């Protein structure tokens, strides 16, 4: 899957705001070139909500294990919830992750190398082996984000 295919898939889910930071938009330079997906049916980046998925295209200072400096490398990050995390990793996000997992392996669903303890999953360069699981995880993350959005809206209207 390419980054464009991921964007197209998520935008087809409805209510998705795709944010692509770039020079001049007020975003920090480190985020330029990355992609952030929010459930935002009004088309405005939520002030309180976090993205439910991201695509990072480079190494960050505290996150070099995925080796995203390689040509064409990127990592999809998905907040698909505790159940999906446990199903894919074999452990709860709060439990210690196995230390023998190589976070640079392509086309492999794994705990996010930095945010795994928060329940995030990651896939470096999703490909044929992970494409269907990635689509399922993205649908789940979208559904969870939509549910959080609805609950926030309901609590505001009370």
Image (spheres, grey):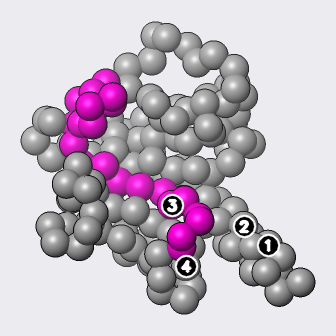
Instruction: List x then y, in percent, for residue 148.
Output: 72, 67
Look at the numbered disc 4 and give the secondary structure of its residue.
loop
Q: Which mark is residue 105?
A: none
Would residue 68 appear left or right of 140 to someone viewing this image? left
Is the residue marked by circle 2 packed among few (<14), some (14-19), or many (20+) residues within 10 Å? some
Going by the picture, which residue comes out furthest to the right?
158
Q: Earlier in the sequence, mark 3 or mark 4?
A: 4
Q: Earlier in the sequence, mark 3 or mark 1?
A: 3
Name the residue carrying label 3.
51
Q: Which residue is mark 2?
A: 148
Q: Which image quadrant for residue 108?
A: top left
> How many numbered discs?
4
Q: Residues within 10 Å of mark 3 (few under 14, many from 20)?
A: many
- In which quadrant is the N terminus drawn? bottom left
Q: Is residue 13 above or below residue 54?
A: below
Residue for badge 4: 40
Label 2: element kind: helix
Q: CA distance from mark 3 to mark 1?
A: 16 Å
Q: Can you give x and y, in whole percent of width and height, for residue 158 in the image?
A: 89, 84
Q: Which residues are magenta?
A: 46-68
Residue located beneath label 1 in the image: 151
The residue depicted at 55 percent of the width and 33 percent of the height is 116
Q: How far apart are the alpha carbons under marks 1 and 2?
A: 5 Å
Q: Position of residue 52 (x, y in %)?
A: 54, 59
């Amino acid at each position: 899957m390419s980054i464009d295919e991921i964007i197209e898939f998520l935008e087809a889910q409805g209510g998705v705001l795709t944010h692509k930071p770039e020079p001049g938009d007020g975003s920090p330079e480190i985020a330029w070139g990355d992609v952030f997906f929010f459930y935002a049916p009004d088309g405005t980046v939520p002030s309180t909500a976090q993205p439910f998925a991201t695509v990072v295209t480079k190494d960050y200072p505290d996150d070099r294990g995925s080796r995203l400096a390689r040509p064409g490398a990127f990592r999809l990050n998905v907040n698909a919830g505790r159940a999906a995390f446990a199903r894919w990793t074999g452990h709860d996000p709060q439990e210690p992750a196995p230390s023998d997992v190589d976070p640079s392996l392509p086309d492999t669903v794994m705990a996010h190398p930095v945010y795994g303890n928060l329940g995030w999953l990651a896939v470096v360069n999703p490909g044929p082996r992970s494409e269907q699981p990635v689509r399922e995880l993205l649908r789940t993350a979208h559904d969870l984000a939509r549910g959080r959005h609805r609950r926030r809206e309901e609590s505001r209207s009370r």
